[in-house]
Amino acid sequence: MSHQSAKDFFRPLAVGAPAPLREIPARPSRAIHFFDPSNEKMAAKIPGMVGTVDVLLGNLEDAVKADNKVAAREGLVKIAQSTDFGPTQLWTRINALDSPWVLDDLTTLVPAIGEKLDVIMVPKVQGAEDIHYVDRLLAQLEAKAGISRPILIHAILETARGVANVEEICGASPRMQGLSLGPADLAADRKMKTTRVGGGHPGYLVREDPPRDANGDTRVDAQRAVFQQDLWHYTIAKMVDACAMHGIYPYYGPFGDIADVVACEDQFRNAFLLGCVGTWSLHPKQIAIANKVFSPSVEDIAHARRVVAAMGDGTGAVMIDGKMEDDASLKQCLVLVALAEQLAEIDPELKAAYDAIPDSEVDA
Ligand SMILES: CCC(=O)SCCNC(=O)CCNC(=O)[C@H](O)C(C)(C)COP(=O)(O)OP(=O)(O)OC[C@H]1O[C@@H](n2cnc3c(N)ncnc32)[C@H](O)[C@@H]1OP(=O)(O)O
Ligand SMILES: O=CC(=O)O
Ligand SMILES: [Mg+2]
């Protein structure tokens, strides 16, 4: 075990490595936008996307052809060195820890662009031991390269063992920034009988009870409402609890049906309501969906501000529009208000929308 006692937890894992952070900053990351740095057409668009998305992620793992792994790594170095990312975070997804590419990914990226890389996403994490390995190696590489602040780690939850070990993964290192659901690999690893990348499934449903005829017999052949259920509810909820417990951030992952912007929005919103702070975007058109869904609505902020104003010192109970509000609902409202304030700092359109909420709606 790398971290055997509480006092050692925040110690740098290599002499000369930057001190670990005590708290993971809550930086806006509504969309983590994936691009393949070996795809010249896609790569050429990246500098122009700075400022339009919270996170740009140079993907080196799945979806990059084996023959292009080196080109992707080198392409990412080139883009990172030649681009001013301003307020936009730069992340990468390295290859799996058992792959032939990952060691070169890390030993190339940290010295070349370590100062610009905010977060390294590690796929197919199985347990704390995977995080400990990357943690120590990053500390050594940071020390050698003289990197000034620690590069954070984000793990993808996409194996059955990873899900079983989710709490120890979140708490494995002070570098842990967050987790994403990886529904495609997770489905395969669990042997789920699906063929999709995220989203619902028409076969996973609950059906309304059958009506009865005049004799009291059930009519199973009658038309009955069916409600499609969410295949990912359990895993997302488990991930959110583990992340919240460790002060790190949960994210939805890929939604592969790029054309179905409606179901994509639904799936993202389920994750937002359950506590996720963002999601992946695989195609430019998913960025706007993510930004919309993971920003609290003007209506929610108007209501939240009313509750905050009405609750005064935060104790007791009040009635607003026929509903009881108290300390617990106030705390939920404060989560939304804090998120709105954070997003308003980087998103002028949102700021204008939140600023336009009339005081009368707040004080009413
Ligand atoms: C399943 C588990 C996982 O691991 S998911 C994460 C791994 N997968 C990925 O990273 C996929 C990233 N996305 C892509 O590769 C492409 O978007 C895919 C899905 C192949 C679709 O590409 P394509 O057929 O070119 O789409 P399109 O014709 O609608 O593109 C329109 C213009 O947009 C561009 N584009 C496309 N995707 C991106 C992107 N991710 N980032 C930046 N630009 C992108 C295209 O190049 C195209 O440009 P233009 O209009 O021709 O100039
Ligand atoms: O990497 C993501 C996944 O769904 O698999
Ligand atoms: Mg995967």
Image (spheres, rainbow, N blue to C red):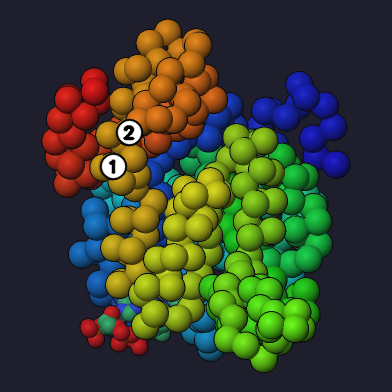
> Residue 118, position in %: x, y?
45, 48
> Residue shown at 37%/73% (left/top)?
262
Say which of 354 and 1 sits in front: 354
In the image, is 278 to the left or to the right of 186?
Answer: left
123, above or below 311, in the image:
below
Q: Looking at the rendering, which quadrant does residue 80 occupy?
A: bottom left
Amino acid, disc 1 = Glu
Q: Residue 349: x and y, percent?
A: 17, 46
Looking at this view, name the residue that lies furthest to the bottom. 221
- Residue at which label 1 appears: 299
Where does label 2 land, which residue? 303
Residue 139 in the image, given as x and y percentages of width and height: 63, 43
Q: Residue 44, percent across and down?
A: 26, 74
Q: Is residue 206 above or below residue 134?
A: below
* Nearer the observer, 133 or 15: 133
Q: Residue at x 42, y 8 (%)?
A: 313
The residue drawn where x is 84% and y is 32% is 4
Between 61 and 341, the one nearer to me in the picture: 341
**Classed neighbour count for the residue bearing mark 2: other residues with Cα under 10 Å, few (<14), some (14–19), many (≥20):** some
Q: Secondary structure at mark 1?
A: helix
